[in-house]
Image (tube, helix red, strand yellow):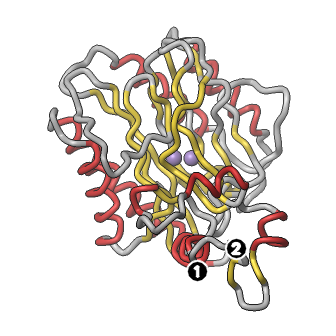
Amino acid sequence: MDADILQCYTDAGQIASRVLQETTGHASRNEGTSILELAMAAEARIIELGGKIAFPCNISINEIASHYTPPANDSLLLQKGDVVKIDIGVHIDGYIADTAATVEISTMDHADLIDASKKALENAISITCAGVNTNELGKIIEDTINKKGFTPIYDLTGHSLGQYSLHGDLNIPNYAASYGNTLHAGDVIAIEPFATYGKGTTGNGDAHIFSLGLNKRFDKHIRDKHNNKFNTHSNGLLDDLYQQYGYLPFACRWVKDRDGVKIEDYVVKGDIIAYPVLHETSGGIVSQFEHTVIVEESGCTVTT
Ligand code: MN
Ligand code: MN
């Protein structure tokens, strides 16, 4: 990997790791904290430390597995006993660090569940190197979680990362999947095991996170390549989103209202993709840990 690119990944990883540590630390000590304030503080801290936000801070509580970022009118407060997953994304020049951890607010009732996804991540990292198949990572994740008496979430996966690309071509399953890809030196992947008391599948709720649709239809028909503008009647909404976020995810609370133009309308047309809140189907509490790692010939480097 080019030294400049490696530096970007390293710096993004350090910022993400620090912000995650500070945010989980604050959450675990401060029952009653507004999760809207917590998310906004984490995002502001990323900027303060010299990074850019790769995606909205996710704060997913109990049976919510992921993709909850508080909307502008959110009134949720952290409560004693909550199992809280905080997921932070930072980029520098588009090179992304994606990292998550789980904390329990003022209790220790779910320590084993939390430990299961943490150990699964550690074990997966311990075997990550060039030549390993992604389904071997899935197998060690599943085995680790099962041995502790829990179930992995089968339909959520880790993923490869690219410049300005949060979900690349590779998936890292959280079980011994029948599919898989061989890892190569220089691949950058986010490994993110989820463990639950439930059956291990997810369903969709409302969406508070969106991105511009990165697909051929979008580039060919929506964006006018000549003037680099989106050729639609969106009152400049799509142009503004592209200028600010490219194809990276953004929170609805970041987007200013404008007359007659709603993000949701463009979701229906396919120009904007919605990322619905994912909740465990059977209502089981969920834990998650995540690191970003660079694959090497004889091991890997954790950037976060
Ligand atoms: Mn993440
Ligand atoms: Mn991820």
* Amino acid type for the residue under numbered disc 1: Asp
What's the CA distance linking mark 1 and mark 2? 37 Å
Q: Tell me residue 10's x, y (percent).
A: 49, 67
Q: Is residue 122 visible?
A: no
Q: Tell me residue 266's x, y (percent).
A: 64, 58
Q: Tell me residue 220's x, y (percent).
A: 84, 72
> Split into 4 quadrants, where in the image is the N terminus?
bottom right
Vertical arrangement, residue 106 with respect to residue 35, above or below: above
Residue 255, picture quadrant: bottom left
Residue 257, picture quadrant: bottom left
Q: Which residue is drawn at 28% across and 27% down?
A: 104
* Amino acid type for the residue under numbered disc 2: Thr
Left or right, residue 290 beside residue 184: left
Q: Can residue 206 be seen in this view?
A: yes
Query: Outermost residue toward the front?
Result: 260
Q: Dots 1 and 2: beta carbons under 8 Å? A: no
Left or right, residue 34 beside residue 222: left
Categorize mark 1 by other alpha carbons within 10 Å: few (<14), some (14-19), many (20+): few
Query: Outermost residue toward the bottom?
Result: 227
Vertical arrangement, residue 205 with respect to residue 63, above or below: below
Mark 1 lies on a secondary structure that is helix
Residue 270, picture quadrant: bottom right
Marking on residue 81: none
User: Which of marks 2 and 1 precedes in the sequence?
Assistant: 1
Q: Residue at x 39, y 16 (%)?
A: 112
Q: Which residue is drawn at 47% across and 68% down?
A: 259
Q: Tell me residue 69's x, y (percent).
A: 41, 46
Mark 2 lies on a secondary structure that is loop
Q: What residue is shown with label 1?
A: 4
Q: What residue is shown with label 2?
A: 232
